[in-house]
């Protein structure tokens, strides 16, 4: 048990991994021992046995061992250990979806009366949570432009959390994580970053750049084959919760009883134990397998995305191309500072007649997800962003002519020929 108990959390190794991403991705979570299977097994048991009354009482008091799979179980724990190693996190909690991860992260540091400041090109589910769901429970949010000064201007005494996405969807804007961290920390708030597009640390490691909480939809690039829904919340070792009454008030306070592991303890208690957004072992296993090839897939997808973005920019039928890896993107300089190994696997472009382009594609699939091995295209105006008021769609960079492409690992030439045929 590593990610589970506060005591081991605070003693766990932190930040910089000693080995490279590719090595950690295939070895972490597999014990080195004779006769033990070389892989992460799928462990389906819900209940774990106690030897005696005393043993049961001790496990319930300390949570040092498995007891019931809603709290922790072996396959999910192996995934969590691997995720923490890849992101350079102190602890990780795997949950049932990216949406569950965002919910857990926000509720872990906010309660009724508290306030969140988020930057604008938010994933639709996050926007819905902040605008429509959490206000019913007394947690309010202000959504501002993706600019640290705009964030600073929206802070209130009761702001506990600043929220950003590594790369926004579909505007492909990049978060200035170091600057946002300074703004949040000067106010006694934490910075949370949805790093779904950052590839579990391969393209971006927000904790090393100053963020306190990182979340993922593991459904996307991490699982990578479009076969599992999963999410995760990770925390680093430098967060300061002394200004947050959830942790600092009470006799004794959570900080006094749980120490440096207070935040990860509260996340597991809330997300898994109390609300029950626990991940199952089968999906956890699919994500474990996905992580093993994540770097390979992302390298190919990012190379393909850059090649396609450059090629689309020169096509007469294409009105605009947006990709942070293009030198003429306003986000290019920031992308060079916060991203490594590539500028992401998603690009957007505008065409005169998006319906015609979609109807002529033969290889690229029309589908509403991201991060699969297969290239997928979507028309955000009528789908992912279709229910938003027009001014919110405009703020997210969504226009009626826009198409979003999540670039897979196919041959770049085949993708270019498919798009050329569709644009002709
Ligand atoms: C998909 C996505 C989510 C939500 O993840 P689910 O696994 O679908 O719940 C959250 N944030 C971002 C950036 C996403 O792309």
Image (spheres, helix red, strand yellow):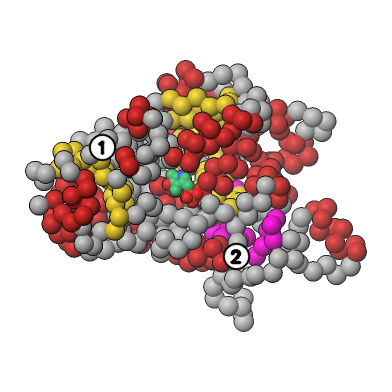
Question: Do the residues bearing badges 1 and 2 touch, measured as CB atoms within 8 Å?
Answer: no
Q: Nearer the viewer, residue 11 or 59?
A: 59
The stretch of residues the image draws in magenta is: 69-90
Q: How packed is label 1: few (under 14 Cα within 10 Å), some, or many (20 or more)?
A: some
Find residue 210 and report its horizontal and vertical position in percent. Answer: 50, 36
Residue located at (13% from left, 50% from top): 423
Q: Is residue 207 above or below residue 367?
A: above
Q: Is residue 80 magenta?
A: yes
Q: How packed is label 2: few (under 14 Cα within 10 Å), some, or many (20 or more)?
A: many
Query: What residue is pinned by disc 1?
Result: 400
Find residue 105 and report its horizontal and vertical position in percent. Answer: 58, 41
Q: Secondary structure at mark 2?
A: helix
Q: Nearer the viewer, mark 1 or mark 2?
A: 1
When asked about the image quadrant of residue 414, the answer is bottom left
Q: Residue furthest bottom?
A: 35
Q: Is residue 110 left or right of residue 397?
A: right
Q: Is residue 118 left or right of residue 259?
A: left
Q: Residue furthest right?
A: 53
Residue located at (43% from left, 40% from top): 123
Residue 205 shows in the view: no
What main secondary structure does the magenta stretch of the protein show?
helix
Which is more N-terminal, label 2 or label 1?
2
Q: Is residue 323 above or below residue 394?
A: below
Q: Label 1 to label 2, Cα distance in Å?
A: 41 Å
The verdict on label 2 being within 8 Å of ligand 1 is: no
Find residue 415 and report its horizontal and vertical position in percent. Answer: 20, 59
Which of the numbered marks, if any, corresponds to residue 371?
A: none
Query: What residue is pinned by disc 2?
Result: 281
Residue located at (9% from left, 52% from top): 424
Q: Is residue 123 magenta?
A: no
């Amino acid at each position: 048990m590593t990610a589970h108990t506060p005591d081991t959390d605070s003693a766990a190794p932190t930040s910089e991994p000693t080995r490279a991403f590719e090595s950690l991705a295939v070895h972490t979570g597999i014990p080195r021992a004779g006769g033990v299977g070389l892989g992460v097994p799928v462990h389906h048991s819900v209940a774990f046995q106690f030897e005696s009354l005393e043993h049961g009482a001790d496990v319930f008091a300390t949570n040092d061992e498995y007891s019931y799979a809603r709290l922790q179980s072996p396959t999910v724990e192996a995934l969590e250990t691997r995720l923490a190693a890849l992101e350079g996190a102190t602890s990780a909690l795997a949950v049932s979806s990216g949406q569950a991860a965002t919910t857990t992260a926000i509720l872990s540091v906010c309660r009724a009366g508290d306030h969140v400041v988020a930057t604008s090109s938010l994933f639709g589910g996050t926007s819905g949570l902040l605008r429509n769901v959490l206000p019913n429970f007394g947690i309010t949010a202000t959504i501002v432009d993706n600019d640290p000064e705009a964030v600073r201007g929206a802070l209130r005494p009761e702001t506990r959390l600043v929220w950003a996405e590594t790369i926004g969807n579909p505007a492909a804007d990049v978060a200035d994580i170091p600057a946002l961290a300074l703004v949040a920390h000067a106010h006694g708030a934490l910075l949370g970053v949805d790093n779904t597009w950052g590839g579990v640390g391969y393209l971006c490691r927000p904790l090393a750049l100053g963020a306190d909480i990182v979340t993922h939809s593991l459904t996307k690039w991490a699982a990578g084959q479009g076969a599992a829904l999963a999410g995760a919340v990770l925390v680093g070792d430098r967060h300061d919760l002394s200004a947050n009454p959830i942790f600092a008030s009470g006799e004794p306070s959570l900080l006094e009883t749980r120490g440096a592991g207070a935040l990860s303890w509260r996340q597991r208690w809330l997300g898994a134990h109390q609300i029950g957004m626990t991940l199952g072992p089968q999906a956890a296993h699919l994500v474990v397998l996905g992580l093993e090839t994540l770097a390979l897939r992302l390298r190919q997808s990012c190379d393909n995305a850059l090649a396609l973005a450059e090629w689309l920019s020169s096509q007469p039928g294409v009105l605009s191309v947006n990709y942070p890896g293009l030198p003429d993107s306003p986000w290019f300089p920031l992308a060079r500072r916060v991203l490594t190994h590539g500028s992401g696997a998603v690009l957007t472009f505008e065409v005169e007649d998006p319906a015609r382009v979609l109807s002529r594609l033969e290889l690229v699939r029309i589908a509403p997800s991201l991060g699969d091995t297969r290239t997928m295209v979507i028309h955000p105006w009528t789908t992912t962003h279709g229910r938003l008021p027009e001014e919110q769609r405009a703020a997210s960079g969504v226009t009626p002519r826009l198409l979003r492409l999540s670039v897979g690992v196919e041959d770049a030439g085949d993708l270019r020929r498919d798009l050329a045929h569709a644009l002709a």
